[in-house]
């Protein structure tokens, strides 16, 4: 009969160490990815606030609402806003197909939330096409949602004034954004979050399926619509 040789304790220990190192590397990699996403989302909020302030300093209007846009940038076929001090439309307004010069309607009831991005791009404060298809599109965020703006018009006791909203944010990233910019409480402060219903990647602020959580719960796959005052 042939003797079967088993593993020694040393060999088992070596394998255990290797497995532990691999698991640790995977977990560390996941943590680095989460941190990078959070950093990108924070940069979006900080960057758009800086862009709006710089635009106002230069042109004395809110981007999108700028009543002098068409005259100033006629060569881009730009469109003016109403100049009433508010940005009409919603952060997630659908983008009309084709060239915004012919497809985008801008008035006191809508369109300025898309015109907002067009004005910032023409002025050089935001990257992207300055004319033609895509010029008025909301930018995508790093978690498969969009970054958009609107003036208030949220649920009761939500943010008022001009706000930026980024959608489809993973639970860990939402709490990370709060930790860096506000108070870690979804329903108060300059950063507010709404819990999205599963399957809705960019819901409106007043979507009845949204809810305001008491706190962020990580590790269960929740996604949030995160907004910040500009």
Image (cartoon, rainbow, N blue to C red):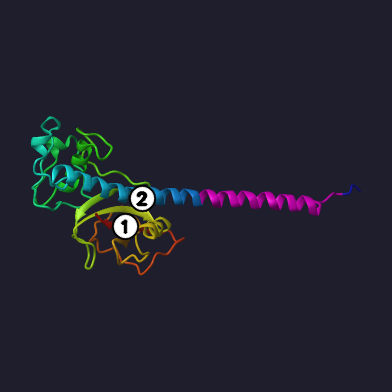
Extent of the magenta region: 4-30
In the picture provided, is 126 more to the left or to the right than 79? right
Q: Is residue 20 shown in magenta?
A: yes
Looking at this view, is 153 or 45 the one in front?
Answer: 45
Kindly indicate the quadrant of the structure image that contains residue 74: top left
- Which is the main secondary structure of the residues drawn in magenta? helix
Identity of the residue furthest to the right in this view: 1
Q: Give the number of the disc on residue 226.
A: 1
Looking at this view, is 33 or 59 the one in front?
Answer: 59
In the picture provided, is 94 more to the left or to the right than 11? left
* Residue drawn at point x = 24 percent, y = 59 percent: 205
Disc 2: which residue: 41
Looking at this view, is 25 or 190 the one in front?
Answer: 190
In the picture provided, is 7 more to the left or to the right than 199? right
* Residue drawn at point x = 21 percent, y = 68 percent: 156
x then y, percent, for residue 42: 36, 51
Q: Is residue 158 shown in magenta?
A: no
Q: Residues within 10 Å of mark 2 (few under 14, many from 20)?
A: many
x then y, percent, for residue 197: 33, 60
- Quadrant of the snapshot with the C terminus: bottom left
Identity of the residue furthest to the top in this view: 75
x then y, percent, for residue 25: 58, 49
In three-dimensional space, the C-alpha distance between marks 2 and 1, rounded to whole angstroms, equals 10 Å
Q: Is residue 77 above or below residue 227?
A: above
Looking at this view, is 221 or 190 the one in front?
Answer: 190
């Amino acid at each position: 009969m042939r003797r079967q040789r088993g593993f020694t304790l040393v060999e088992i220990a070596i394998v255990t160490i290797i497995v532990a190192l691999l698991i640790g590397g995977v977990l560390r990699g996941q943590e680095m990815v989460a941190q990078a996403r959070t950093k990108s989302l924070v940069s979006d909020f900080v960057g758009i606030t800086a862009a709006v302030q710089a635009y106002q300093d230069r042109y004395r209007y809110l981007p999108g609402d700028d009543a002098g846009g068409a005259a100033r940038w006629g060569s881009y076929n730009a469109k003016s806003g109403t100049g009433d001090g508010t940005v009409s439309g919603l952060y997630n307004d659908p983008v009309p197909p084709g060239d915004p010069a012919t497809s985008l309607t801008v008035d006191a009831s809508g369109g300025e939330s898309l015109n907002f991005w067009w004005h910032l791009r023409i002025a050089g404060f935001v990257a992207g096409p300055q004319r033609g298809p895509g010029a008025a599109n909301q930018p995508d965020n790093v978690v498969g949602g969009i970054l958009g703006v609107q003036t208030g018009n949220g649920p009761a006791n939500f943010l008022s004034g001009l706000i930026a909203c980024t959608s489809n944010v993973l639970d860990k990233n939402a709490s990370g954004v709060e930790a860096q910019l506000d108070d870690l409480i979804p329903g108060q402060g300059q950063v507010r979050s709404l819990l999205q219903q599963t399957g809705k990647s960019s819901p409106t602020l007043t979507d009845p399926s949204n809810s305001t959580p008491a706190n962020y719960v990580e590790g269960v796959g929740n996604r949030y619509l995160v907004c910040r005052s500009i």
